[in-house]
């Protein structure tokens, strides 16, 4: 357990206006009669019912978007438990030895296959139980140490990092840890800690980020002992090897039963399950990812997680910490890239100087180093806050996932440019020529999925923006709701007037305007003053946008994306300043890195603030409508276009599978 001092809301700052009560009772909104045929309003209602609607713990990110720079929530830098860290280091040492002596990452990439022996070795180490409590046979690692293990594994083979992450960040262990009954934990967690693999199945061929259209059904049996699952799930990571599944399915509403999207633990070998296909991707070639069909699969009632209708709420809550696994691998990629870029740029000579000394390359080196430090700091802070259950990190975890996935991609792109032709060449080809096999092109391919996995960049922008404007919606919701009557609008107007009368004056003046403020941070003080001023400016901009667009605000996705990106940069700046200041005696060079990072981030923040109001958003939307209507289709002439004899999204119908089962069964160790 970690501790964060001064992590309570400051006096007079505990509320953001009236708290919105959670009127859902934890149940999902009623689903439309026929899945797949939903209105925009119905889709929003289902998504809104799934989100956590109250704030009962402090959140640095939430306060930041409201113009309140609560540095006391992250300063002093939170500390982890030394005894738990020492125990974790012993495991990490064993993991490192195993990865470097018994795992061939090149072979996994070449063969698109993680050998059975690697599964067995990871199981012996306890790697499949890193997040499972010791009382159930797991290692019980903190979020911080778990992410360090993923970083280490991913540096040998990103496919192994994805295997372990999907298994326990979003697979069966985490939902059971948070929402399972004591009986469920005792029945399933020891199996998973011992090496069985789990998978999470939500996505369907025509259902991604819009779960209201979920088509997989779970019909209660007449005798009440369980459910019959029918449907098809797409892109189930670990789906070809998993023996336990978390499946999201729609329980139909009936008399006395509200139904809704529900989470089930399903035995992977249950009768009626067919793994119809293993999917292949641009990167992560060793990934075991499936198309899985369910036909009249019986699931006992005791395998429901959290109760009927709670599935989406469970999924979103699980992802609050589950999302930290992706930035862990992004940070690992940044560290790897920095090593390759530094050594290559010092060794390679052009025009009489090492290429790293030329300004065009020096800029890229500086960006890679500073941004890797920023990503690692954000991740470590989020992990430490997550390990202290007094904090709500739903915004912070989403921000670091968004930020790290985008920045790691830029780092990889810059590294290929620094390496030139060798960056585009495969490791196998480099080895054949007698050169160091730096698999830069593979890393670029492997990293690309992180901008899509567990919430695409575009969805993350909207998710974070929804939380960022929650205070405004809680007081102004009925004002902008077209279905609200005059009475509701009048009451909302009174609440909003009282809230904004208190809140708006706080955005005019702040500590960041005092020249000597944050002086204890030395050369980093100026950056913190910028964060404080920018936080208030961001809140003012958001308020102005709400006033201007009101109910249409949700359609201003480009604007909301920039608001979120500004918040991410400010969060990163604050984090690196606090961390570098805390380590100034033991790691004085980190103060330099923090300064470089903040200077670069300030340039990006200035550009984003300008783009809030000076942009081509409306022009682009109008152009897109004409593009979709085919007005410019002639522009596509002159090339051979993709074949049009198949649908963009393959249709599926309920029923037994007509294809062979391609699941891979990992044999027991000899």
Image (tube, rainbow, N blue to C red):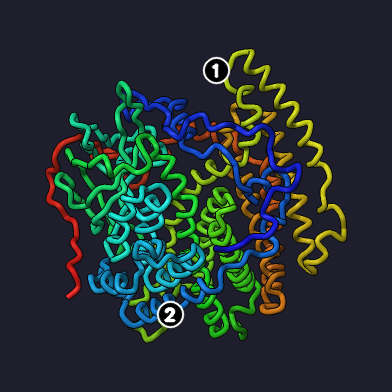
Name the residue carrying label 2: 93
Question: Who's the residue at 14% across and 52% down the image?
Answer: 661
Residue 275 vs residue 172: left or right? left
Residue 406 vs residue 155: left or right? right
Of badges 2 and 1, the one in the foreground is 2
From this view, report whether residue 65 is shown above or below residue 104: above
Which residue occupies the foreground of this view, 145 or 301?
A: 301
**Position in image of residue 587 (x %, y %):** 66, 78
Residue 353 vs residue 71: left or right? left
From this view, report whether residue 532 is shown above or below residue 28: below
Disc 1, SS: loop
Question: Who's the residue at 68% across and 53% down the image?
Answer: 605
Q: How many marks?
A: 2
Which residue occupies the foreground of this view, 301 or 561?
A: 301
- Quadrant containing the C terminus is bottom left
Name the residue carrying label 1: 483
Question: In the rendered image, is residue 377 in sight?
Answer: yes
From this view, report whether residue 83 is shown above or below residue 329: below
Q: Residue furthest top?
A: 486
> Label 2 vs label 1: CA separation?
60 Å
Q: Quadrant of residue 296?
A: top left
Question: In the rendered image, is residue 627 in sight?
Answer: no
Disc 2, SS: helix
In the picture, the disc for residue 523 is none
From this view, report whether residue 324 is shown above or below residue 505: below
**Position in image of residue 345 (x %, y %):** 56, 79
């Amino acid at each position: 357990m970690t501790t964060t001092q001064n992590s309570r809301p400051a006096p007079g700052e505990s509320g953001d206006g009236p708290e919105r009560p959670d009127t859902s009772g934890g149940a999902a909104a009623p689903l439309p009669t026929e899945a797949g045929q939903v209105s925009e309003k119905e889709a929003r209602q289902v998504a809104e019912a799934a989100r956590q609607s109250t704030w009962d713990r402090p959140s640095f990110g939430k306060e930041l978007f409201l113009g309140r720079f609560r540095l006391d929530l992250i300063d002093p830098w939170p500390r982890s438990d030394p005894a738990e860290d020492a125990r974790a280091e012993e495991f990490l040492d064993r993991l490192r030895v195993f990865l470097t002596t018994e795992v061939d990452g090149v072979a996994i990439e070449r063969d698109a296959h993680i050998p059975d022996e690697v599964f067995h070795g990871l199981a012996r180490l306890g790697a499949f139980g890193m997040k499972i409590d010791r009382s159930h046979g797991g290692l019980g690692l903190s979020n911080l140490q778990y992410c360090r293990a993923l970083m280490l594994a991913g540096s040998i083979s990103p496919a192994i990092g994805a295997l372990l992450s999907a298994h326990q960040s979003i697979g069966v262990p985490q939902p059971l840890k948070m929402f399972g009954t004591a009986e469920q934990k005792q029945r399933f967690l020891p199996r998973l800690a011992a090496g069985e693999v789990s998978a999470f199945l939500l996505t369907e061929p025509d259902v991604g980020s819009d779960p209201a259209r979920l088509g997989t059904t779970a019909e209660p049996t007449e005798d009440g002992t369980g459910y019959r699952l029918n449907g098809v799930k797409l892109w189930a990571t670990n789906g070809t090897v998993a023996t336990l599944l978390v499946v999201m399915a729609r329980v139909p509403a009936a008399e006395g039963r509200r139904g809704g999207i529900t989470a089930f633990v399903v035995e992977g070998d249950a009768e009626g399950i067919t793994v119809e296909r293993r999917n292949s991707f641009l990167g992560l070639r060793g990934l075991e990812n499936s198309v899985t069909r369910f036909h009249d699969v019986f699931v006992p009632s005791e395998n429901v997680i959290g109760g009927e209708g709670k599935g989406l709420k469970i999924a979103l809550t699980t992802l609050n910490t589950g999302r930290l696994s992706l930035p862990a691998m992004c940070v690992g990629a940044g560290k790897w890239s920095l090593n390759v870029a530094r050594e290559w740029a010092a060794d390679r000579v052009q025009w009489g100087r090492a290429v790293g000394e030329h300004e065009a390359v020096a800029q890229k080196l500086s960006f890679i180093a500073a941004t890797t430090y920023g990503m690692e700091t954000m991740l470590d802070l989020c992990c430490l806050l997550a390990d202290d259950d007094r904090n709500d990190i739903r915004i912070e975890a989403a921000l670091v996932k968004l930020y790290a996935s985008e920045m790691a991609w830029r780092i990889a792109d810059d590294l290929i440019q620094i390496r030139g032709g060798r960056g585009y060449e495969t490791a196998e080809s480099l080895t054949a020529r007698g050169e160091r096999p730096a698999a830069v092109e593979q890393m670029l391919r492997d990293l690309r999925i992180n901008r899509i996995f567990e919430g695409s960049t575009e969805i993350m922008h909207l998710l974070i923006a929804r939380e960022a404007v929650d205070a405004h919606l809680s007081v102004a919701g009925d004002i902008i709701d077209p279905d609200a009557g005059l009475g509701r609008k009048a009451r909302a107007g009174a609440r909003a007037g009282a809230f904004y009368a208190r809140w708006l004056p706080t955005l005019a003046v702040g500590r960041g305007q005092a020249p000597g403020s944050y002086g204890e941070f030395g050369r980093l003080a100026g950056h913190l003053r910028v964060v404080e001023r920018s936080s208030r400016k961001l809140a003012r901009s958001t308020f102005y946008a709400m006033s201007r667009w009101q109910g249409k605000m949700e359609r201003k996705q480009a604007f909301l994306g920039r608001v979120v990106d500004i918040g991410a940069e400010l969060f990163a700046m604050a984090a690196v300043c606090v961390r570098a200041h805390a380590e100034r005696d033991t790691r004085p060079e980190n103060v330099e890195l923090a300064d470089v990072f903040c200077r670069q981030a300030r340039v990006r923040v200035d550009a984003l603030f300008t783009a809030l109001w000076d942009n081509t958003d409306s022009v682009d939307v109008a152009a897109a409508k004409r593009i979709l209507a085919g007005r410019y289709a002639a522009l596509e002439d002159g090339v051979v276009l993709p074949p049009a004899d198949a649908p963009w999204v393959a249709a599926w119908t309920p029923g037994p599978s007509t294809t062979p089962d391609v699941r891979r069964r990992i044999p027991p160790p000899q």
